Amino acid sequence: MLGEVNVDNTAKIPVSLWAVIQRINRILAMENKLLLESSGHQEKEDFGDWYIIDPLTKAVTVRNCEIEELARKVGALKPNETI
C-alpha cells in the first residue's frame, strides 16, 4: 500500500519533499520570501534545518520551519497528501 491511510480509509497520496519545497517557494515568492535549507552545522544551530528569508535584503524572517506544517499552512500540501 502506498502512503498513509486517513481516518475515513482513503489513502494519502505521497508527494516528494522536493516537490513540496518547490510548491512552498512558488507561494512564498508572491510575498518576496524564499524557503532555504541550512547547509552547515553553524547555520543549522542558528536557523534550524529550514528557514525563510527575504531574498531582497537576505534577512532571515522565520527560523526552524517544519516543512509539513508550513506546507499545510500556505496551502502547498492538500489534506489527502503526505510527504
Image: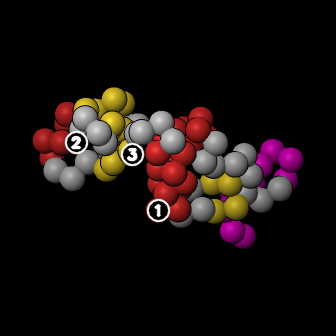
Q: Which residue is mark 1?
A: 18
Residue highlighted by disc 2: 44
Residue at 25% across, 35% down:
57
Quadrant assignment, res 13 = bottom right
Q: CA distance from mark 3 to mark 1?
A: 12 Å
Q: Position of residue 40 (x, y in %)?
A: 16, 50
Q: Quadrant of residue 69?
A: top right
Would residue 36 be seen by someone viewing this image from the given angle? Answer: yes
Instruction: Report the quarter where the N terminus lies.
Output: bottom right
Q: Which residue is mark 3?
A: 35
- Indicate the quadrant containing the C terminus: top left, top right, bottom left or bottom right: bottom right
- Counting from the top left corner in percent of width and height, residue 59 is at 25, 32
Which of the two discs, 3 and 1, labels the residue nearer the N terminus?
1
Figure check: 71 above or below 64? below
- Image height of 59 relative to 35, above or below: above
Q: Nearer the viewer, residue 16 or 8?
A: 16
**Residue positioned 33% across, 48% down in the render:** 36
Horizontally, residue 77 falls left or right of residue 56, namely: right
User: Mark 2 or mark 3, which has the lower sequence index?
Assistant: 3
Q: Closer to the observer: label 2 or label 1?
A: 1
Mark 1 Cα-neighbour bin, 10 Å: few <14, some 14–19, many ≥20: few
What is the magenta range? 1-9
Element at badge 2? helix
Looking at the rendered structure, the secondary structure element under dot 1 is: helix
